[in-house]
Amino acid sequence: MTGQLMLKMAQANLLTLLRDRKALIMLLAIPVLITAVLSFALGNVFGSNPRIPSFPVAVYNEDSGSLGTGLVRVLRSQSGQMTVHVEDSLAGARADTTTDKANVVVWIGRNYTQQIESGHKATVDVESTSAHSVQRSVVQSIVQSYGQEFADKAYTAGQLPGSKATIESANIQSRTTSLHPVTTGAYYAIGMMVMFMLTNAINRAGAMVRDKRSDLYRRMMASPASRYAIAGGHLVSNFVILALYGAVLLLCYRFILNIHLGPIDQTAMILVAYSLALSGISVALGSWISNIRIMDSLGQIGSQVACILGGSFWPLYGMPKGIQVIAHGLPNGEVLTALVNSIIGINSAGLLTPVLYLVCLGVICGLLGSLRYGRSIETGGAAG
């Protein structure tokens, strides 16, 4: 009986939305239009631009000799072209490319010093995505020049045999990693979808607050139906509507704006988790807040602040570190980061943490909302 009531409420809420065709069109048209405008206006925010004066480089130095350290020092001295930081592991250096902490990864191989001093080829891997091929070429030239300069000096000083005078001292292995660049259109498609889903969720919470003033709400609370079932009906209906809304927006971005996102299974997994989180938040807000003015202020100001902090209007990596920490605590910021990582090429296992966070957030907020739902009638708070 409880399950049937929840499904009936979900069906009624969905049909109400579908009947309002004007509102439905606006819900879809505005996000697509704004995404198209942002993609065009801010088209140079992402991608490789060879005119950028400085770019970040992550270095993993596996060599224990002096020449490996010297190469790091030479790279760091190129402050007009790049900013260099050293990582403790190759995995850490490569992970920096997913957070825009590095455009290029330099991996100085083990025994680099020993190989050069003995006149053999030493290995240095210079890695980047295809979007940063220009920066990769710059780093390659510096690495090659450093190794060759030492070989030339060693030969001149008689430290290398004549037969090895022309041997390149650094074997540069240029690699394009499996990571993919994020286009402006893809970023803002995700940002706008995340923002409008959050706004929609808060608006649905506002509708719940307004319903507390209606006679229908009082009759429902006076009926034998469990308030937990009614709150669950709101949770299910919100989840279905938000998930469908997000999916339709993504389909519009794909087939109208021709924006390619990450793998379908990963995108769907994140979308479902985000819809559940927003549904729980919506029910919690609609159950605990009785003052419509507070709810309106939260919808008009609070959602916009959350979207700004969450990176919907400006890339997170361009924000101060403190803001980035706050963004990862917000559900919209966590989703935006997860979807961007999905596009970059992070596998599903690497996305489990944000997905589990969103699912737990939705369940906890949903439970808190169901515990509170209907109690304002008992305490006289419905008229607040």
Image (spheres, rainbow, N blue to C red):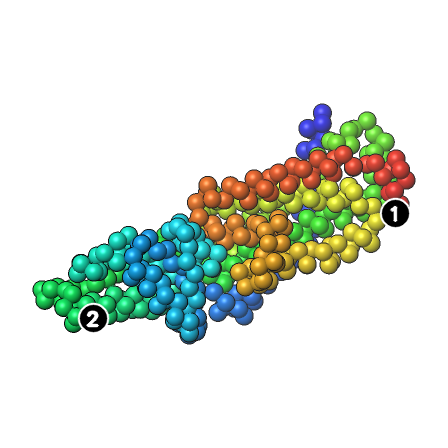
* Residue 11 visible: no
**Dot 2 amino acid type:** Lys
Q: CA distance from mark 1 to mark 2?
A: 84 Å
Residue nearest the viewer, comparing 132 with 339: 132
Find disc 1 in the rendering and name its residue. Answer: 384
Judged from the image, the secondary structure of the residue bearing numbered disc 2 is helix
Task: Count neighbours of disc 2 (C-alpha within 10 A) and say few if under 14, some if 14 to 19, many if 20 or more.
Answer: few
Q: Residue at x 53, y 42 (%)?
A: 353
Asked if 218 appears above or below 173 in the picture, the reply is: above
Amino acid at the residue labelled 1: Gly
- Disc ID at residue 347: none
The quadrant holding residue 30 is bottom right
Does 221 sit left or right of 322 as displayed?
right
- The residue drawn where x is 76% and y is 49% is 206
Helix or strand or loop: what does disc 1 sit on? loop
Q: Please name whichever residue, 91 or 4, is drawn nearer the observer in this view of the structure.
A: 91
Left or right: 197 in relation to 118 = right
Residue 306 coordinates in the image, percent (x, y):
66, 56
The answer to whether any part of residue 210 appears in the image is yes
**Mark whose residue sits in front, 1 or 2:** 2
Q: Which mark is residue 153?
A: 2
